[in-house]
Amino acid sequence: MKKLPTILAVLLFTTTIQAQTVEVRNDRILVDGNAIATITRQGCRAASLDCTHFIRSSEGRTLITVIARDFVDPNQRTAGNPEGKVWYLRFSFADGRGVAEVADPSIRNIRPRDVARIIVSANLIEGDDLNEVEVQNFIQAHGTHFSDRRQELNRDRQIIIVR
């Protein structure tokens, strides 16, 4: 009986998330058929990680810039990832609102639909602008642990030359 409220909450949450259909068509992010923003890509070739997505309002104002990044972390070496590569997405919000980083869900082949799903599931856009509260929640929840770790590894690899 104690588990019933938890089960109901999970079912309600799952139903709510599934109720929204997220698509990208003609560079527009559509939620249940309604355009909420445009998304354009720069770079994003199959053999290259150099990939940037620009999310813009209907007026063409950039709201979010999403950059695919990677680095090598020796602690992440596994049989399936012998190099220890770590892929992540860096979300930079307009007007200096902040930065957040998310593990790359597609591992190197980031698609506009993947970016759009993250944006919609976090409710980052409301109307034709950023949802300030949700942006701050997103930044707090995700932080910058990937670039922090990257800097830590680079600091450890500094070579000092003494003459």
Image (spheres, helix red, strand yellow):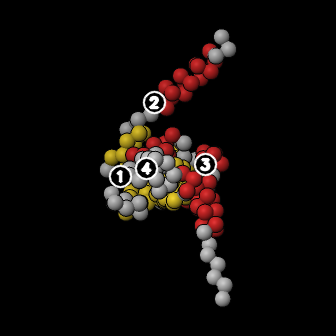
Q: Callout 1: few (<14), some (14-19), or many (20+) C-alpha neighbours within 10 Å?
A: some
Q: Which mark is residue 107?
A: 4
Residue at the extreme top of the image, as rendered: 1
Circles 3 and 2: CB distance less than 8 Å?
no
The local secondary structure at tag 1 comes to loop
Q: Nearer the viewer, mark 2 or mark 1?
A: 2
Q: In the image, which disc is placed on residue 18?
A: 2
- Residue at 51 percent of width and 59 percent of height: 72
**Relative to 111, does residue 23 appear above or below in the rendering?**
above
Q: Amino acid at mark 3?
A: His
For disc 3, the marked residue is 142
Mark 3 or 1: the one toward you = 3
Label 4–label 3 contact, CB within 8 A: no
Q: Residues within 10 Å of mark 4 (few under 14, many from 20)?
A: some
Look at the picture and state if 52 lies above or below 109: below
Q: Earlier in the sequence, mark 3 or mark 2?
A: 2
Dot 2, crowdedness within 10 Å: few (<14), some or many (≥20)? few
Identify residue for label 1.
27
What element does badge 2 sit on?
A: helix
